[in-house]
Amino acid sequence: MRMLLIHSDYLEYEVRDKALKNPEPISDEQRRGRLEEVLAVFTSVEKVDETNPDEVVEKAVAEIKDVASQVKTNRVFVYPFAHLSSELARPDVALKVLQKVEERLKEEGFEVKRAPFGYYKAFKLSCKGHPLAELSRTVVPSGEVVS
Ligand SMILES: NCC(=O)N[C@H]1[C@@H](O)[C@H](n2cnc3c(N)ncnc32)O[C@@H]1CO
C-alpha cells in the first residue's frame, strides 16, 4: 500500500462519473464531502497487499497514527487514489482494505471520512506547507519486499 499524506486546511470532493463498472454504492449525502484541519491520506492498495490484507491495514493505521500525532490532528480523510502504484490490488480487495482502515482509525478515536471508491471525483485541497505537511509512506505484508 502506498500513501501520500497531506496535512491540509481542508479537503473537499464531489463525485463525478463512475470509474469502475461496479463502484461502491453511495448515498446522495456521500456524493460530496469536506473536512477541515485534516490529514488527507491518498492511498493505492497494491497487489502485494493481497497476500495479507489484515496485516497491511494494521501497518497503515500505525503509520497514519504516527503522522497524525506529529502534525497534531485527530482528523483523517481516507482517499482511494489509484495513481500511486503501477501494481494495483483488485478493486474488491482494495475497497475492503480501505473500509477496514477507516474502521480501525475510528476505533483508535480519530474523526474519519472516506471518499467513495470507484469514482472519478473533483477535489480541492489546501496543503498547509509546513515541513511535515507532505509525506509518503509505503507498507507491505511482512516477508514481502517493497518494489
Ligand atoms: N482518482 C480516482 C481514482 O483513483 N479512482 C479509483 C479508485 O477510487 C478505485 N480504485 C480501484 N482500485 C484501487 C486500488 N487498488 N487502490 C485504491 N483505489 C482503487 O477505483 C477507481 C478506478 O481505479
Image (tube, grey):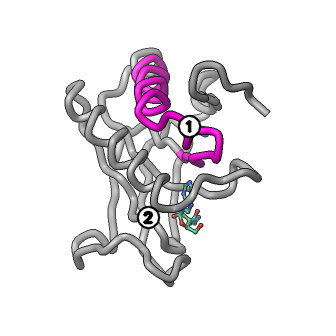
* Residue 120 image offset from top left, x and y in percent: 54, 74
Quadrant of the rendered image holding ligand 1: bottom right
Q: Residue at x 62, y 28 (%)?
A: 137
Look at the picture and state if 81 lies above or below 22. above
Q: Residue at x 76, y 53 (%)?
A: 86
Residue wearing tag 1: 51
Q: Residue at x 30, y 32 (%)?
A: 105
* Quadrant position of residue 55: top left
Label number found at residue 117: 2
Q: Is mark 2 within 8 Å of ligand 1?
A: yes
Asked whether, in this view, residue 32 is left or right of residue 108, the answer is: right
User: Which comes before the other along the chain, label 1 or label 2?
Assistant: 1
Asked whether, in this view, residue 126 is left or right of residue 68, the answer is: right
Q: Quadrant of the C terminus?
A: top right
Kind of element beneath mark 2: loop
* Residue 80 image offset from top left, x and y in percent: 50, 55
Q: Amino acid at mark 2?
A: Phe
Q: Residue at x 64, y 39 (%)?
A: 48
Q: Is residue 93 magenta?
A: no
Look at the picture and state if 127 lies above or below 131. below
* Magenta part of the chain: 42-67
Label number found at residue 9: none
Look at the picture and state if 49 lies above or below 18. above
> What is the crowding at mark 1: few (fewer than 14 residues within 10 Å), some, or many (at least 20)?
few
Look at the picture and state if 69 lies above or below 14. above
Name the one closer to the observer, 44 or 112: 44
Q: Is residue 49 magenta?
A: yes
Name the one closer to the observer, 20 or 130: 20
